[in-house]
Image (tube, grey):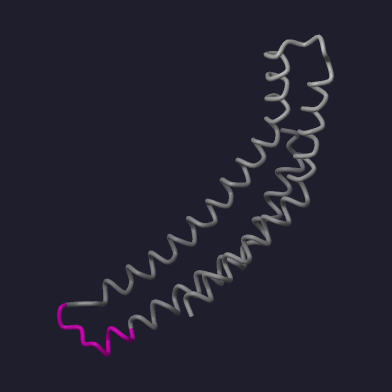
Amino acid sequence: MAEAAQERVQTSMTSMVDDIDKSYLRKMQGDMHRCAARCCDDPSSSIDKVHGCIEQCSIPLQKAQHFVQTQMSDIQERLQRCVMQCQDKIKDKVGPNTTEAEVQGYKVEFEECAVKCVDDSIATFPNHARRIKDHLHKRAF
């Protein structure tokens, strides 16, 4: 059950990143390459000037990718914190005299809690995606 939940999160995150890539990042990547190609068009420019120009072309995409990565890391950290709270709840219940039957029950309780964390996290993905897209749309980087 936990593996299926983990796969759902991974699939949902991949889908969200793919959508953001297709909506914004890919166009920015094309713009970066076109800009870099223009940098190479001036035969009188020095190699240092061409390299500096190419680096400048890549800055907007790098900033956008960094922003997206930061947001994705935040989503993952929130999910991890939720699962850790599930672990802590179970740890507080387990004692030296806990029976094997109780341990099995706690494992089920933990899995249910972790799956709820996953469900709650996935439910926030549309809002996260909208916020990321809004930020990318508003920022010219």
Q: Residue at x 64, y 42 (%)?
A: 65
Residue 100 appears at what percent x and percent y? 24, 87
Q: Is residue 30 above or below residue 43?
A: below
Give the camera-side residue of 53 and 120. Answer: 53
Dominant secondary structure, magenta: helix
Q: Residue furthest bottom?
A: 101
Give the camera-side residue of 37 and 106. Answer: 37
Q: Residue furthest left?
A: 96
Q: Is residue 55 above or below residue 126?
A: above
Q: Is residue 131 toward the left or the right of residue 105 in the image?
A: right
Whether residue 30 is in magenta: the answer is no
Q: Residue at x 28, y 83 (%)?
A: 103
Q: Quadrant of residue 141?
A: top right
Q: Residue at x 45, y 61 (%)?
A: 80
Q: Quadrant of residue 19?
A: bottom right
Residue 79 appears at what percent x and percent y? 49, 62
Residue 74 appears at what percent x and percent y? 53, 51
Q: Quadrant of residue 62?
A: top right
Whether residue 101 is in magenta: the answer is yes
Total numbered circles: 0
Q: Is residue 49 toward the left or the right of residue 114 in the image?
A: right
Q: Is residue 45 above or below residue 102?
A: above
Residue 125 appears at what percent x and percent y? 64, 61
Give the camera-side residue of 138 and 26. Answer: 26
Q: Which residues are magenta?
A: 96-105
